[in-house]
Amino acid sequence: MDELYKERIAYQPTLPHCLQDLDIVSFVDGKEGLSHNEEVKETLPHLFGLPKVHLEKASGSKRALTVGVVLSGGQAAGGHNVITGLFDALQKIDPSSKLIGFLGGPSGIIEGKYQELTAELLSGYRNTGGFDVIGSGRTKIESDEQLASSLAVIKKLSLDGLVVIGGDDSNTNAAILGEYLVSNSCETTVVGVPKTIDGDLKTEDVEISFGFDTATKIYAEMIGNIGKDALSAKKYFHFVKLMGRSASHIALECALKTQPNYTFISEEIAEHKTGLQAVVSDLADCVEKRSKEGKNYGIVLIPEGLIEFIPEMKELISVLNDVLGKEGNVDALPSEVKKTFDLLPEGIQKQLLLDRDPHGNVQVSHIETEKLLIELVKNELKTRIFQGKFSPVQHFFGYEGRSGYPSLFDATYCYALGHVAALLVREKKNGYMASLQGLRGPVDEWKVTGVPIPSLFTFEMRKGKRKAVIKKALVDLNGLPFKKFIEHREQWEKEDAYLCPGPIQFYGPPNISMVIPKTL
Amino acid sequence: MDELYKERIAYQPTLPHCLQDLDIVSFVDGKEGLSHNEEVKETLPHLFGLPKVHLEKASGSKRALTVGVVLSGGQAAGGHNVITGLFDALQKIDPSSKLIGFLGGPSGIIEGKYQELTAELLSGYRNTGGFDVIGSGRTKIESDEQLASSLAVIKKLSLDGLVVIGGDDSNTNAAILGEYLVSNSCETTVVGVPKTIDGDLKTEDVEISFGFDTATKIYAEMIGNIGKDALSAKKYFHFVKLMGRSASHIALECALKTQPNYTFISEEIAEHKTGLQAVVSDLADCVEKRSKEGKNYGIVLIPEGLIEFIPEMKELISVLNDVLGKEGNVDALPSEVKKTFDLLPEGIQKQLLLDRDPHGNVQVSHIETEKLLIELVKNELKTRIFQGKFSPVQHFFGYEGRSGYPSLFDATYCYALGHVAALLVREKKNGYMASLQGLRGPVDEWKVTGVPIPSLFTFEMRKGKRKAVIKKALVDLNGLPFKKFIEHREQWEKEDAYLCPGPIQFYGPPNISMVIPKTL
């Protein structure tokens, strides 16, 4: 056992004032009007129209609860603390309560694979990263058979509640399962907890999803170190691709934390319909301008989803998916699309043609955007009278940020979220998501809300069917964080304004150890 | 300014007891016999035969000193602290002492590019990473012209001393410059400080080079996080290549810190003359064995220099360099060598043929060893009845570890090394390297030694000439760290014994914040 591990599992996160005594609080309906999309009524008749609920002083019920918990989707730091927070809250409500963990994600519910989570077992996972306590998975409980199997397992276990820790899709499915249970006379309360490092599960009430803080701190540590290195060696242009799916929240947060020379925000490129040539040309301008100042080095941040936001690339991928079969004839591409294809380096062309998923679709996430941009900038510089040196180095930061020890913010936030989930179950708030507000303020003053998941639903066409989804929150181009970014980016492009935020600290003064995300 | 930065620059490292009052200590010749290679006598007649020196209680001289300092080669965390330690020690010796920083590495000496380092300027660099305070460079002061220009600049500045912060080559050249100066009646004392993250500058007296601790902690943080992620997702086999040039010290240290499933130690492969096919086959065995246990995931650590230690690859590269011109005819390769070549994936073949340095040599450091191994393991598994899944992910950790905030160990070690360098200059110990012993014990008890650099010299043929070098320390296959590793590696291969050492801590208990490297 290493030393930090021993210290972390012994750490006790503080709780917001309102969660310190669960016996004297209870949920009451919020007064604010909350409009649900009318279309929800059809799919979720029982859960349609539910109000927001707030935690207020009132005597809470005390009864032993049996609760199931499941981790769904990609890892995010703090998942273990949601579980230990849930466990501790259940124990406080009644010491004979039980917590059952479903193994390997939602498939554990369908297949009835679970394990009781005891104090002893959980003692080794407190404040640690990863989802290894019960594992996670990406199976969705969607089909009639899956719903029926889940119902059977839930009934067999006599669960009072089921807590689903997941992202937008998992929370959507939590509500759908909640509706299915209630319409099948099962009284189990299904509750969601907002998880994702990508930061795209964000609503008026859900200020942030957990895991985002830790991931961006880890990425920013690395980017900051690379910035210092670039500034010292003065030799390399570092191209850093960052995990985060479609949205550019992670890239924006890291940019604000580290002040690199160039950061792509996909949403801005989509908004301005910036073409591939313009994207490359602007980046090459940055390289050239810096080189003229004697700076043959720099850092560029690239959000993972960038490619899908560049109009011609989107078009090209869609045409490749629809028109061409696997290894189809490139000459059959419409001439405009063929032009885009011809711009691309050979390696990427090959990948687009050959690397398809089982449905024959281009695997966008496999495209090495950082390499693509490097090659295109190289080609662009060849067409110019570029006298400088351009030595690019590529990086991709992703997996290293999902399962680190949670920052004190994530550890505290998640521990509290676990408590909120326990209370939502106790008070039978079926179809609600656990939420805390006022996260920019002191932990003591954080407020608790239950958000009815159906109120977040919009409907989209998916495979020819209307489907309920929680809309992924993209970077708001009118929001303060983005404005702050565009205010400074010209300066950051020219100057070496790199910041080096350093490694996450678990000790020391709160302005070091309890820093909140800049985009929050 | 970010918060951690403000805290770090205000931090005051503790000093070993013997360095707390510089007025009452002085160097005395060591009693132990120290044999110099006889060949040294020819190249360094004045510095030949110098004894080790130890710091003992005795009144030290107090006089104002003008000292130059230069950073040479790649970044290593703590470089700034050597400089601030040197500055503070010079101020303690006499407040009118001056420190002059040569800009951009040794070329700053040759070209007379320098800047006075004042208390105010240095105040922003204390305990920070990077070499950005004066920059670094890889120019070597070797030719007669370079030596003469350096002498002129050193004379013009009336330097009492010149402190060279660098690796094996830089320290070698420091001694050669020291000899040149004394033989040209210049009284400037040249002193070396052992720097390199690679850990290959290690002798009986130099227990560790600075920067190794911070770099391996940063890499181990990332590897540990990836291990947690692999264990949670259970989907990916992570192949992590680690910086560190020829030697596998970094890989070994990270293996001991994180307990991955498979770690290549280049020195072992060379010792056993393990062939490429055997290397790949053994790694494929690991993948297959784990898969049979239902574990289609894992972590593999690969030292950067691995390829040069695999006999056939070494042979292949040497033949490609010597026999074939650029884009030469592959069929002209000797049949044994051609067989190795044919084993390689197409991308690597292309790289070997086309990606040459200005001298036409294969650029070994450009070979993506991690990708090579992935492709070869894939091919190997195809020849077996492999029923599992093999989804590899590749990583390279390098630049992010060289310029982070120094760990408390590196910050303290470097600050003390700066003091030792100041004392060596004060006492005119020309051609010595600053050294501290007892680093495994409390800082208070660290001992100070001056090591005559020429005593570390061996001679090698380089470009047809005998050349003095400090032999790079490779991993000692009889040493305790390697023995510890082989004792556990079978267990680590099968089980998921991953450790997650977490981010470097600057606060908290010493067993968390002042951890020393396991290989020390």
Image: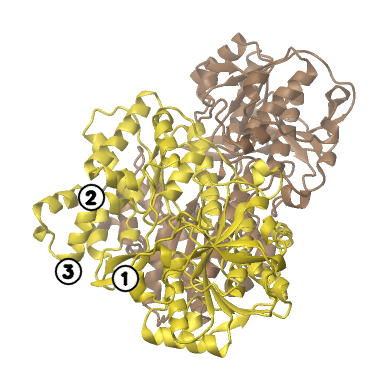
Chain colours: A brown, B yellow
Q: Are marks 3 and 2 in contact (CB under 8 Å)?
A: no
Of badges 3 and 2, the one in the foreground is: 2
Residue B491: mark: none
Q: Name the amino acid type tagged 2.
A: Pro
Asked if residue B4 shows in the view, the reply is yes
Rendered location of residue B271, percent (x, y): 28, 45
Q: Which residue is mark 2?
A: B311
The verdict on a common chain for dots 3 and 2 is: yes
Work out whether A358 lies above or below B368. above
Q: Name the amino acid type tagged 3.
A: Gly
Q: Which residue is mark 3?
A: B325
Identify the residue at horizontal 60%, vertical 66% (top origin).
B27
Q: Is residue B190 left or right of residue A204?
A: left
Identify the residue at horizontal 85%, vertical 33% (top origin).
A18
The chain letter for the residue carrying disc 1 is B
Q: Which residue is outermost to the top?
A: A156
Q: Are marks 1 and 3 in contact (CB under 8 Å)?
A: no
**Badge 1 or badge 3: first in the primary sequence:** 3
Rendered location of residue B326, percent (x, y): 20, 68
Q: Name the amino acid type tagged 1.
A: Lys
Q: Which residue is mark 1?
A: B467
Alpha carbons under labels 3 and 2: distance apart: 22 Å
Residue B44, quarter of the rendered image? bottom left
Q: Secondary structure at mark 1?
A: strand
Work out whether A186 lies above or below A142. above
* Along the line of sight, the residue nearer the viewer: A348 or B351: B351
Rendered location of residue B390, percent (x, y): 35, 35
Work out whether A133 lies above or below B480. above
Of badges 1 and 2, the one in the foreground is: 1
**Disc 1 residue crowd, few under 14, some 14–19, many 20+, Cα 10 Å:** few
